[in-house]
Image (cartoon, grey):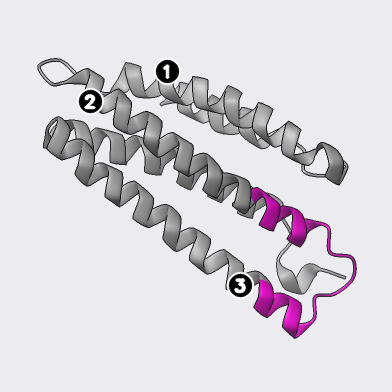
Amino acid sequence: MKKITLLITAFLTFNLSFAQDDMAEEIAMMQEIFGVEKASIMEQNIDLSGVNSDAFWKLYDEYEKQRQELGMARIELLQKYTTKKGALTNQQAKDLMAEAVPLRSAGDKLILNYTKRIEKATNALVSVQFYQIENYISDGIRFAILNNIDFIQDKK
């Protein structure tokens, strides 16, 4: 799990304060690096012996593509929040929540969907290992982000 912690730390050193024009390119580069490291962690921690590993990796690659799309939307939302100058109005707070809640729900549904599909293609142990690692990483990132951004009442 030490490697996972290092991966999360590396991901969070990514600075969201760069110019808007460079944002998509920078995010794509970071997601590519993050994806390679994450696949390595999956490979080291999921026991694919005795199962169809090709089926697992095919599903994992599909999952990652969709996860990256959601990740891009989350980063854009975080960018909106962190670049707000002055206090948030009630409407701005409401608008942020209207984006945040569906993104969180979509991420949870995506993991669950692929956990079920991985179980059908491999077995329950592999799917649970995938689920556990994926949630460990995503929850670690969420915690670190929340730990490093201002609470709304702190925005001035």
Residue 25 image point, x, y percent? 74, 33
In percent of the image, x 77 and y 38: which residue is there?
15
Residue at the bottom extreme of this rendering: 90
Residue 132 image point, x, y percent? 31, 39
- Seen in the picture, residue 1 relative to 127 is either above or below; the reply is above
Magenta span of residues: 75-95
Is residue 99 found inside the magenta-colored segment of the image? no
Q: Which residue is mark 3?
A: 97
Q: CA distance from mark 3 to mark 1?
A: 34 Å
Q: Which residue is mark 1?
A: 40
Is residue 83 found inside the magenta-colored segment of the image? yes
- Seen in the picture, residue 58 relative to 89 is either above or below; the reply is above
Nearer-N-terminus badge (2/1): 1
Instruction: Tell me: 89 left or right of 129.
Output: right
In percent of the image, x 22 and y 36: which residue is there?
118
Which label was assigned to residue 55? 2
Q: CA distance from mark 2 to mark 1?
A: 17 Å
Amino acid at pointer 3: Met
Amino acid at pointer 1: Ser
